Amino acid sequence: DSIKVFCPATVANVSCGFDVLGLALDTVGDEMTLTKTNSGEVRITEILGQDLPLEADKNVAGVAVKALLEKGGFKNGIDIKIDKRIKPGSGIGSSAASSAGAVWAVNHLLGTPFDTLDLVRFAMEGEKLASGAAHADNVAPALYGGFTLVRSYDPLDIIKIDAPAELHATVIHPQIQVKTADSRNILKQSISLKDGIKQWGNLGGLIAGLYTQDYALIGRSLEDHIVEPLRAILIPQFQEVKQAVLEAGALGSGISGSGPSIFALSEGTENAEKVAEAMYQVYSKTGIEFDIHRSPIN
Ligand code: HSE
């Protein structure tokens, strides 16, 4: 019994939704092969593409799968092979892809005893291992697809948000590593009422814009007055990229997850291509290596 799965990269936060909003990229992700065995053990048998721990307790996929098996009282063994195409520390949900993909596949191998919300809980154990924080804004879109909102963490309540079919994401990934744990440590633990007002206004605006396919509203809601100003210093040419993509026709842009990737949203493939070109123009002058990904969101 074996299954091969695609595990999508994800953009968390989406500017105004720190720790609550995320979206899945259709075209970027890892591949994993999971096999049910009689060994009674969870084993990471192979990791291609990256140097990551093979020890199950130190690997996000291993930890997430163990949480699932334990909760269900399953005594099965699971072998996990990971073809890691998303680099750790990229800001597009590398750890989430592994943990979400692994629990989805194991649930399937066991005859789907758990629902998607349960799978999010198990995958969050992997996120806790990766960054010290069990945030769900990457694992939820990885498991549900499209746009998701974590309405509440306790109790966990996740809403899948309808997004317009023509909405595209373009993401530039500068090849520098930013650890989520580090970029969480630089955040302040309290915010002003004034900043709160701006943020929940934008979050409501973004959700309304997604449901009503109001691209202009989506664009003007892509603001973050709380986290982005503190993290932007970690990302070379951040403001230049933001400026360039707006000029190229993006609806808006921001830091993808905890960075260093920068995302932009746009209407239609043609605009997404122009945005990718604008990102390319800014970064090709820096001497920093980078990748650019384009993807529809649904
Ligand atoms: N919401 C998380 C953070 C996402 O910004 O720290 C990490 O990918």
Image: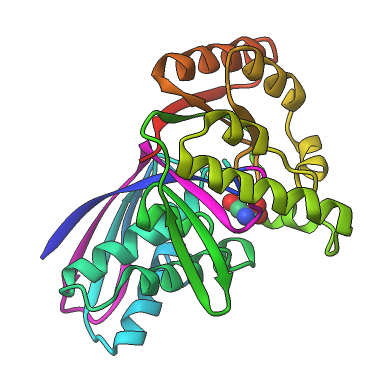
165 to the left or right of 158: left
User: Residue drawn at (29%, 78%), measured in percent from left and top?
Assistant: 41
User: Residue drawn at (36%, 86%), measured in percent from left and top?
Assistant: 71
Q: Quadrant of the N terminus?
A: bottom left
Q: Quadrant of the C terminus?
A: top left
User: Residue drawn at (20%, 67%), measured in percent from left and top?
Assistant: 108
In the rendered image, residue 205, in percent from the top left (x then y), is placed at 62, 45
Say above or below: 152 vs 17: below
Is residue 21 inside the magenta stretch? yes
- In the foreground, 105 or 149: 149
Can I make out residue 161 in this image?
yes
- In the foreground, 229 or 215: 215
User: Residue drawn at (42%, 21%), measured in percent from left and top?
Assistant: 268
Q: How many marks?
A: 0
Magenta stretch: helix, strand or loop mostly: strand
Say above or below: 48 vs 153: above
Q: Quadrant of residue 290?
A: top right
